[in-house]
Each structure stands twice: as structure tokens, then as C-alpha cells.
Amino acid sequence: MIIRTTPDKEKARSLFSMTEHREKFINSLLVSDDSATVITENYYEIIKELGTIILLVDGFKTIGEYAHKEIIEYLAKNKVLDSSEAEIADDLRTKRNYSSYEGRKISKEYITNKKASLLNIIAKLKDLAKTKLSK
């Protein structure tokens, strides 16, 4: 559920800092069968946190069972992500959920094939988050 709240730039800035730490961590790893799951999960966390930042600055937050899905839907509805980007982000969410909640490994091929698209989504969200935080 998306609810209206007071915009919280301080929390948003803190989350932004976390995304930068995650990016540095991911960039220090080579994609391998052993690291693919961790890399994929961290790409997801970055996208989710950047989406959360955008919502926080806009004066919203998500709560409940489908909160992360609703972040992606909010970004698509507000034309932050186009339909193919939202589809990729939602697929990443699903992969991360299978990994986190069911212990399924994510293949090296998945991250190799999706990396460029994920980096584009991250760059787009990061630029918007920076713009919103600077206002």
C-alpha cells in the first residue's frame, strides 16, 4: 500500500549513501557462479532503495506485503521507468525473492544478460533521485 507522508529528505539522503556503498561493493566483485546471486540481490536493493528515495521526496512510502512491487508500479505509473524497464525491475524483484526466501541461486547468465539494462535503470533512478534531493 502506498501512503502519503511528510517528505523526508534526510532519510532519502541516508538511503542514497547506502546505494553508493552497494555500488562500490558490487563493482569490486567479478561475476561468477558463486557471486551472481549476491550481485543480483544488491542490484535489486539499489533499485528498490532509489525508488524508495523518489517516493520519500515525493511524500509517499510503501507498506505491507507488496510494498516493493508497488515501488516499481509507482515508478512506471509516474513515467520514471518505461514499461520494459519496469518489467526488468519486476523480474529482478521476483528473482531476488526466490533467492532470499527460497534459497534459490541466481545464475551467472542472468546477471550477465541483464547487467546493462540494470545499470541503465540504476543510472536513470540515481539521476532523478539526485535532482529531487538537490531541490
Image (spheres, rainbow, N blue to C red):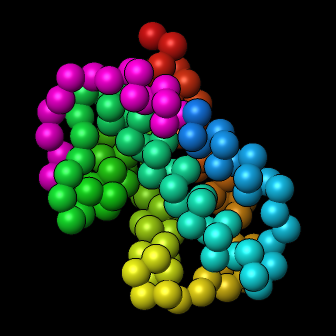
- Relative to 107, is 49 on the left or the right? left
Q: Residue at x 47, y 19 (%)?
A: 133
Residue 11: give x, y in percent of width and height.
Answer: 40, 28
Picture layout, residue 57 above or below residue 78 = above
- Relative to 76, is 109 on the left or the right? right
Residue 116: give x, y in percent of width and height.
Answer: 72, 59
Q: Residue at x 39, y 21 (%)?
A: 9
Residue 122: give x, y in percent of width and height.
Answer: 60, 47
Q: Is 3 covered by the magenta stretch? A: yes
- Relative to 129, is 65 on the left or the right? left
Q: Residue at x 24, y 47 (%)?
A: 62
- Quadrant (top left/top right/bottom left/bottom right) for the C terminus: top left
Residue 17, visible in the rendered structure: yes
Picture layout, residue 47 above or below residue 128 = below
Q: Residue at x 48, y 36 (%)?
A: 15
Pick the residue in front: 83 or 17. Answer: 17
* Corner quadrant of residue 3: top left
- Relative to 51, is 38 on the left or the right? right
Q: Is 118 covered by the magenta stretch? A: no
Residue 123, visible in the rendered structure: no
Pick the residue in front: 57 or 100. Answer: 100
Residue 50: give x, y in percent of width and height.
Answer: 48, 41
Segment tinted magenta in the rendering? 1-16
* Corner quadrant of residue 42: bottom right
Number of callouts: 0
Extreme residue in the top direction: 135
